[in-house]
């Protein structure tokens, strides 16, 4: 997603790009984690197992049964912190479908804060007006390479991390302060 913050991966050579593309298709030798702020309050941890299908005309993705063309999609999450009206989650992308995290959280009525396509538009207006936060809070936090070989063998066993941005961290601090004022 072009509006997702954090890590970006690219191949410097054609061979590296080809191997990266294969890794991202196969998914067994990489692990991708994200941090997201979602609308509403979630507890604990969970899985969202819902097939997704992209509309070729609109570009929008929706939960669609496999028999109607949906592709298997699995997202796991762990709650990191609750706020009065939102939840910070760590997300593991098990499959890698277009807009998967955004659509999966929207499908369980907890859309990503600031998401202009699949989001809670009233919550987005609140976050923009109250906190000046006007884009989606979805951050590619870590990428781990497991048993990779070939031209990417130097990446075997490595994990790359991207801390939250100053803006994201400031928003979380403001949410904590607002909760303290409310006596949460």
Image (cartoon, rainbow, N blue to C red):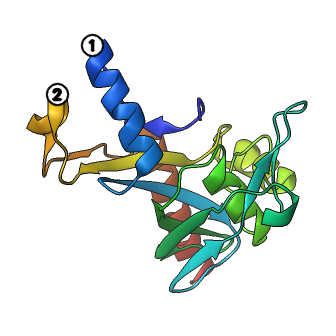
Q: Is residue 31 above or below residue 133?
A: below
Number of the label disc, if any, that sits on residue 55: none
Residue furthest out toward the left: 154
Q: Residues within 10 Å of mark 2 (few under 14, many from 20)?
A: some
Picture quadrant where residue 132 is located: top right
Residue 13, disc:
1
Q: Is 108 placed above or below 92 here?
A: below
Do labels 2 and 1 touch, CB within 8 Å?
yes
Image quarter where the N terminus lies is: top right
Left or right for 32, reference 58: left
Q: Residues within 10 Å of mark 1 (few under 14, many from 20)?
A: few
**Which is nearer the eye, 104 or 109?**
104
Element marked by disc 2? helix
Separation (CA) of disc 2 from disc 1: 10 Å
Mark 1 residue element: loop
x 62%, y 80%: residue = 42
Q: Nearer the viewer, residue 113 or 25?
A: 25
- What's the residue at 69%, 62% (across, down)? 104
Regarding residue 132, the answer to whether it shows in the image is yes
Residue 99 rendering spot, x and y as whole percentages: 66, 46
Q: Give the image location of residue 74, x and y in percent.
A: 58, 66
Q: Which mark is residue 151?
A: 2
If the image is split into quadrants, where does the C terminus sit? bottom right
Residue 165, visible in the rendered structure? no
Of pointers 2 and 1, the one earlier in the residue sequence: 1
Residue 170 percent coordinates (x, y)? 45, 48
Left or right of 18? Residue 55 is right
């Amino acid at each position: 997603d072009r509006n997702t913050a954090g890590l970006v991966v690219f191949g410097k050579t054609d061979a590296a790009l080809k191997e990266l593309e294969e890794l991202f298709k196969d998914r067994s030798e990489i692990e991708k984690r994200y941090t997201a702020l979602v609308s509403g309050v979630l507890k604990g941890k969970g899985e969202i197992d819902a097939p997704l299908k992209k509309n070729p005309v609109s570009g929008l993705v929706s939960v669609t049964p496999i028999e109607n063309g949906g592709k298997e999609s699995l997202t796991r999450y762990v709650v990191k912190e609750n706020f009065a009206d939102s939840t910070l989650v760590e997300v593991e992308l098990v499959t890698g479908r277009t807009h998967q995290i955004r659509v999966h959280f929207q499908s369980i009525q907890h859309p990503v804060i600031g998401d202009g396509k699949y989001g809670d538009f009233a919550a987005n207006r609140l976050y923009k007006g109250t906190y000046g936060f006007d884009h989606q809070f979805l951050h590619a936090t870590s990428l781990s390479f497991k048993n990779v070989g070939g031209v990417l063998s130097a990446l075997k066993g490595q994990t790359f991390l991207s801390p939250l941005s100053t803006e994201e961290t400031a928003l979380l601090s403001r949410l904590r302060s607002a909760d303290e004022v409310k006596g949460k």
